[in-house]
Image (spheres, grey):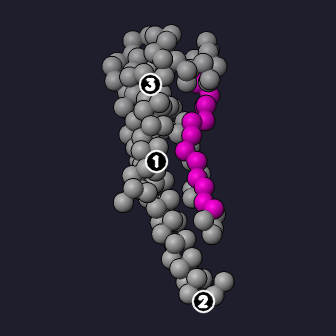
Amino acid sequence: MGEIADAIMKEIDTEVKNRIQQAFNQGLSNARMNIYSFYTGSPVMYERTYTYGNDTLKFTNVSGSKGNYKYSIYLQPQSYNTGHHDAMTILQSIQSGAYGVVGTPGTWNKAKKSIIEAVKSSFSG
């Protein structure tokens, strides 16, 4: 490419990277807010560990170059010392409200939607 085309591509790439970073930052913030919104009510049958809010949400930072950028925001099941259910069953129960788990169900589904909205918002302006 010529010098002008290279300069244009560099500017476009910088703008794309900035918007991807903006989407990541807002998406992670939204996901955290949604995850923490689970904590309502007061369990009687168990002691709340806050593992879901503090340890389960994971991410990889924005990486890549030349228009090929990626990041991840996801849930990673953690160990729970309940003695009754494995980590995946507990995560599913948190989302559905099963097994007497006290809190607002569906927070990860809300988080996923807010991550998508952050991407749309970052690229709509």
Disc assigned to residue 106: 3
In x, y percent, where is residue 52?
50, 31
Residue at 63% from the left image edge and 87% from the top image edge? 2
Task: Please name the residue shown 55% across and 83% down the image.
Answer: 7
The quadrant in which the C terminus is found is bottom left
Quadrant for the N terminus, please. Answer: bottom right
Magenta stretch: includes residue 75: yes
Of tags 3 and 2, which is closer to the observer?
2
Q: Identify the element where label 1 is drawn.
A: helix
Magenta includes 98? Answer: no
- Residue 86 locus on image (x, y percent): 64, 19
Q: Earlier in the sequence, mark 3 or mark 2?
A: 2
Residue type, numbered disc 1 = Leu
Q: Disc 2 marks which residue? A: 3
Q: Which residue is mark 1?
A: 28
Whole-angstrom CA distance, mark 1 to mark 2, is 37 Å
Magenta segment boundaries in residue numbering: 68-81
Query: In the figure, residue 42 lies in which quadrant?
Result: top left
